[in-house]
Amino acid sequence: MTSEPSRRQPGDTTGLTQDAGWEIGVSKTLPLPVAAVWDFIVSPEGVALWLGKGVDLPTEKGEEYATAEGVTGELRSYRPGDRVRLTYGTTTLQVAVSASGSGKAVLRFHQEHLADAVERERQRAHWKAVTAEVVQALGVS
């Protein structure tokens, strides 16, 4: 994957928060009901796209997981039909699905406690690519 040139200017602190450090959020509105998007995101096929192939998504707080790439973490919260929040290595990742008008859903990936602006930009590209894969798998645009 090629990365796009950084849009950051020297001294740019976009994405730097006092509480969560560097963070990134990527979202996409989909022409599907919340339940359809949620069911896919927590299915083995959906989890493979955003968490890793072969990973069983934890559903109990404190339950641990590991990816084939060596990323480990534990579940912080699981609210069926709404969101999953888990540690992802040294960061925290949240995947959420919410309603956006009649028959539409917004899929959001939010990652915080990133190391720096460079990691933020790298993760922005990653979550945009993951979102595109989810859109393709769902057969929507």
Image (cartoon, rainbow, N blue to C red):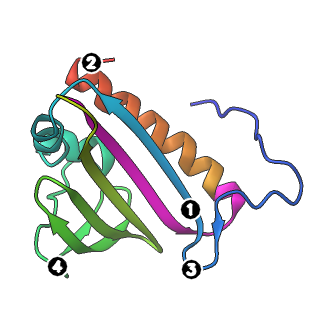
Crowdedness near tag 2: few (<14), some (14–19) or many (≥20) residues, C-alpha within 10 Å:
few
Residue closer to the observer: 64 or 6: 6
Q: CA distance from mark 2 to mark 3?
A: 36 Å
How far, Cα to Cα, is label 2 from label 1?
A: 27 Å
Between circles 3 and 4, the one closer to the viewer is 3
Crowding at dot 4, Cα within 10 Å, few <14 / some 14-19 / many 20+, comes out as: few
Element marked by disc 2? loop
Measuring 68% from the left and 65% from the top, which residue is drawn there?
116
Against 85, residue 98 (above or below) is: above
- Kind of residue at badge 3: Asp
Badge 3 is on which residue?
Answer: 19
The image's mark for residue 46 is none
Q: Amino acid at mark 1?
A: Glu
Residue under label 1:
23
The residue wearing badge 4 is 61
Q: Is residue 21 above or below residue 23?
A: below
Stretch in magenta: 104-119
Q: Amino acid at mark 4?
A: Lys
Q: Is residue 137 magenta?
A: no
* Secondary-structure class at tag 3: loop
CA gap, disc 1 and disc 3: 10 Å
CA distance separating discs 3 and 4: 22 Å
Of the numbered discs 3 and 4, the one sitting upstream in the chain is 3
Q: Earlier in the sequence, mark 4 or mark 1?
A: 1
Q: Amino acid at mark 2?
A: Val
Residue depicted at x 63% and y 78% = 18
Q: Which residue is mark 2?
A: 140
Label pair 4/2, CB-CB below 8 angstroms: no
Please tell me whether mark 4 or mark 2 is closer to you in this view. 2
Residue for point 20% across, 41% down:
46
Q: Is residue 141 left or right of residue 45?
A: right
How many marks overall? 4
